[in-house]
Image (tube, helix red, strand yellow):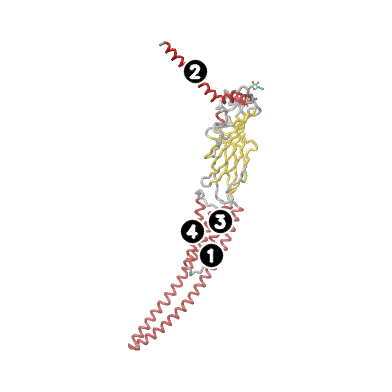
Amino acid sequence: MTCVNMGRTSLARAMRLVLGILIGLEYCICHRPVYMEVGDPSRTDFLPDQRLSEGLQDLLRGYDPRIRPNYSGNPVEILVGISVASFSNINEVDMEFGLDIFFRQHWKDHRLSHNLTSKITLTMGTKHPADYIWVPDTVFVDATKSYMHNVLTTNHKIDISADGQVVWGTRATLRARCHMNLRTFPMDEQNCTINIISYAYPTQHLVFNWKSPSLVVLDKEMAQFYMNEVTTAVGRTQYVAGEYSLLQAAFSFKRRMGFYLIQIYIPCIAVVLVAWMSLFIDSRATPARVSLCITTLLTISTIWGAVNSSMPRVSYVKAIDVYLMTSFFFVLCTMLEYIGLIHQERAKKGLLRIKAPFFRKVDLHRESCDLTSESSLHQGELCSVEEGKRSQIELNDVKKNEASSGQENDEIDSRGVDFAARIAFMVVFALFNFFYWFVLIYFK
Ligand SMILES: *[C@@H]1O[C@H](CO)[C@@H](O)[C@H](O)[C@H]1NC(C)=O
Ligand SMILES: *[C@@H]1O[C@H](CO)[C@@H](O)[C@H](O)[C@H]1NC(C)=O
């Protein structure tokens, strides 16, 4: 009984021992490389880094990122520098423009003065600098949609100098409102501004200023615009919550005319010329002239619709509207001229028709009636046949005369009208173009 017990306990002990050895071995195999890397006391090359890390931890121990530097003292001054990487498209319908910026802010936080190295540069991984230190709560007032970049990690760079000077650089993409005046569109120039304020701190806590070079534009090109000039300003603005320090950057964009020249003006001129060519078509070719006029009218209204589909519904007339409206009017005039011509011809022809053939016929009938009544049956037949032939010949002559003389007159009339219309049309259209471009270029 005891022997069996003894045997059992020793067996259990032995098994426990084996298990223990196994676990120990497994632990050694799995964790040895990590242990070697992190805590090898023979390696000293990472000690400066460890010291820096400890120094940084010491620096931030007891640091409250919610409280601005020198809270009870002078307002903290934020110096701002912007590099515009590129502008994205300017949207007339929403009256917005976009820009991709590198945004730098400099300030002094005496709590962060250190003697670790001359300057520590920190990256943030997936965190935000505000998780560690106080950063200004800058707001882009006009921005409707904006985001920071976090590919591959959040795009932040923090430099802390030994004297506590902090530089925070970050990258942001903004879409900002821009009120546009489109009266001289498409030869317009748009001024768009970006206003920067602090969200929480009025002027007694925080003031903004530009740090030179205040605004650098790295890429001025856009598809439809190019950046003309950029100005910066410093000011103060009053809100309900108090007086705030304000920074302003104003960009002026000039529209490239080329697109509208190629896509709108030249086709429009071509259409007006086609309408003008309808004046060279014979006025008797009604289907040709009418269809040409109507086609050109529709084409201009299509162009007009295409222009305004990408425009905001402003309640004033744009320069391009003036051009399209006038072109439309010119095409309409060719149509009206032709309708006037037809009306005139019809009036003349109608009068002749009523005057001549109708009365003639009555006369002939009367003659033949007289003949039949006077003559005998056999004579009458002969007579009526001869008389009929004669009258037929007479009628043909009359008709021929009428037709040739009347139509010639009409043709000469309509040709004269068309000729005058052609010249008047060209002269007026050329004059209109001259004044239009002159005014648009010199008196914008
Ligand atoms: C804090 O503000 C006071 C003025 O109220 C000023 O004398 C002092 O130099 C400021 N301290 C720092 C570190 O800027
Ligand atoms: C560095 O600053 C700490 C206080 O922040 C001070 O105790 C230490 O003596 C300084 N070391 C040197 C080398 O200046």
| Furthest-top residue in this view | 2
Mark 1 and mark 4 lie on one chain; the one further toward the N terminus is: 1
Q: Which mark is residue 432?
A: none
Queried on whether the Cβ of the residue with tag 4 lies below 8 angstroms from ligand 1, the answer reads: no
C-alpha span from label 4 to label 3: 16 Å
SS label for mark 4? helix
Name the residue located 37 percent from the left edge and 82 percent from the top edge: 366
For mark 4, does the 10 Å Cα neighbourhood hold few (<14), some (14 to 19), or many (20 or more) residues?
some
Residue corresponding to mark 1: 277
SS label for mark 3? helix
| Furthest-left residue in this view | 377
Residue corresponding to mark 4: 298
Residue corresponding to mark 2: 17
SS label for mark 2? helix
Location of residue 111 in the rendering, given as x and y in whole percent from the top left corner: 61, 25
- Tell me how many marks there are: 4
Residue 184 against residue 382 in the figure, above or below: above
Image position of 315 (left or right of 206): left
Image position of 210 (left or right of 346): right
For mark 3, does the 10 Å Cα neighbourhood hold few (<14), some (14 to 19), or many (20 or more) residues?
some
Residue 306 against residue 15 in the figure, above or below: below
C-alpha span from label 1 to label 3: 18 Å
Residue corresponding to mark 3: 265
For mark 1, does the 10 Å Cα neighbourhood hold few (<14), some (14 to 19), or many (20 or more) residues?
some
- Amino acid on which disc 2 is placed: Leu
State which quadrant residue 141 falls in. top right
- Amino acid on which disc 1 is placed: Met
Mark 2 and mark 3 lie on one chain; the one further toward the N terminus is: 2
Mark 4 and mark 3 lie on one chain; the one further toward the N terminus is: 3
- Amino acid on which disc 3 is placed: Tyr
The answer to whether any part of residue 113 appears in the image is no
C-alpha span from label 2 to label 3: 95 Å
